[in-house]
Image: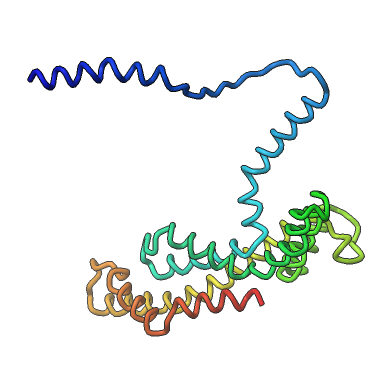
Amino acid sequence: MNCRLLFFSLLFFLIPAAASAVNLPTVTFGISDAGTPAEVSTALQVLLVLTVLTVAPAILLMTTAFTRIIIVLGFLRQAMGTQNTPPNQILLGLALFLTLFVMAPTFNTINQQALQPYMQEQITQQQALSRSMEVMRTFMFSQVQESELQLLIDLTKEEQPADKEALSSAILIPAFMLSELKRAFQMGFMIYVPFLVIDMLVASVLMSMGMMMLPPIIISLPFKLLLFVLVDGWQLVVGSLMKSFV
């Protein structure tokens, strides 16, 4: 008992002494008057950069193949009726890696034509951003449909652009997103059809047998899983997704 009392007494005196011997950093925030216009400009630039960083992931995902992939995978899970299997984390991870696989040539081009020259101080930041945007526009033009482009042009009431270079990114990006949604829903419909047939067959059999109280989805789920495994469904779905970007 005396040893414990001595131990806690030493801790009581040594901890404050050790804390006082170590200089701990502090972080302070404040607002003060700007002395020069340059200070105001720097503060606004920092605020703008922080704002862009918060929305940059969403912008990057919306201008890549991620939209189509994640929607198709979501339709697949709903059509199978497996509730939260695979989990959202698994679907998002698979969609991200498939997006990197599809966008690898585009990202490599950006790295060679924009990032590496900028890191070697061969071009300016504005030139690097312009080159990167041109590469992304090339990818989006390869996937966007003319009907969506014409819809956005008509809504903005702008003149018909003479070529692709004359079309602004403010029209191209939403048109690309609409095209991705349209194709994703088309692929989702094709995925739903075989599973819907199984649900209808199981429901008809249960009704003919008079088993009205048994939910058909409980009986149809094993058959849908069996069908999906026998036809190697993941390979078919992922393969179709990858081929749709060619």
Rendered view: 44 above or below 137: above
Image point (43%, 66%), residue name = 77
Res. 160 image quadrant: bottom right
Above or below, 202 relative to 118: below
Name the quadrant of the C terminus.
Answer: bottom right
Residue 185: image x %, image y %? 57, 67
When asked about the image quadrant of residue 184, the answer is bottom right
Q: Closer to the camera, 37 or 183?
A: 37
Q: Which part of the image, by quadrant, shows the N terminus?
A: top left
Is residue 232 found left or right of 3 in the rendered image? right
On screen, residue 222 above or below 130: below
Q: Position of residue 69 (x, y in %)?
A: 56, 66
Residue drawn at 40 percent across, 70 percent down: 80
Task: Locate residue 162, reporting x and y percent.
Answer: 92, 65
Is 71 situated left or right of 135 in this image?
A: left
- State whether residue 210 appears in this view: yes
